[in-house]
Amino acid sequence: MSQPPSWLQRTPNWVWWAFAPILGGLAISFAGYKAKVRSWVVGGVALAIAALILAVSSNDVGVFLWGAQIGLAFYIKKPFLLRTYPRELPLPDDRHAIRAIAATRSQIDINNCSKDDLVRGLGLPIVYANDIEELIKDGHLFTDFDELIELVGIPEEKVRQIAPLVTFGYYTSKEVDVSWRRLNSYSADELTTIVGLDANVAQKIVSERQRGQYQSVLDVKRRTGLPLNAYRQAI
């Protein structure tokens, strides 16, 4: 048994209705209504009205408009499919397609979303969604895409794929005392006794901090040269 075409390969029924002489422009209006594109709605109605009027006085122009509405239907077919791409379907591999889909959706805030958003909305495997949820529960707020790669282990290609759909919010209410931001305020002794860092690691973090506060976990790594495992219990 053959598999049904993927969403982006299908031809919606309204495209075939666009073949109807004179009134086929209404099919384009319907597509505009479904995709929430006002110009398609207006253009389709205009085509239908013009075709109806000119069909009486000019067969040649009527035929031209009929061909135009068919051509327009196929021209907007892909944009229509991208704008109506169902949330429950896995994201396509094409980055350009994902950008088009992202333009029609609200971005997903990694720091303030549900596990369902991560799995269904971004197409992340459940193991990554669980790790993100656990880190946020422990007080970590993600600040950039590199953290998703290095802290969670999401492949770089996947991160680049979902990037247009993702944002990173900052929430003061989630700044609990177990956040990595302790690295900006705790003394070397506190990092050693409270957090449990090695004394040399704690001293390195505090010394480098004198040049300015750390902006993210990966900023700590870049500036201190310390591996993440050296201060993982702080994040």
Image (cartoon, rainbow, N blue to C red):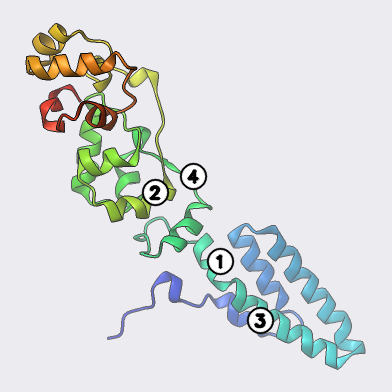
- Secondary structure under tag 1 reads helix
Which residue lies at the image location 80% right of the left edge and 70% below the top edge? Answer: 46
Q: Label 4: few (<14), some or many (≥20) within 10 Å?
A: few
| Mark 3 / mark 1, whichever is N-terminal | 3
Q: Which dot marks residue 106?
A: 4
Q: Which residue is mark 3?
A: 71
Q: Residue at x 21, y 14 (%)?
A: 206
Question: Which type of secondary structure does the marked residue at label 2 adopt?
Answer: helix
Give the left or right position of residue 178, taking residue 113 as reference: left
Q: Nearer the viewer, residue 68 or 207?
A: 207
Real-space Cα separation, disc 1 to disc 2, in angstroms: 20 Å
For this view, does 79 lie left or right of residue 185?
right
Q: Closer to us: mark 3 or mark 2?
A: 2
Mark 1 = which residue?
79
The Cα atoms of the two marked residues, 2 and 4, are separated by 13 Å
Relative side of 31 to 95, left or right: right
Asked if the residue under mark 4 is in contact with the one under mark 1, i.e. CB atoms within 8 Å, the reply is: no
Q: Looking at the picture, which amino acid does disc 2 mark?
A: Ala
Question: Gap between marks 3 and 2, in whole Å?
Answer: 33 Å
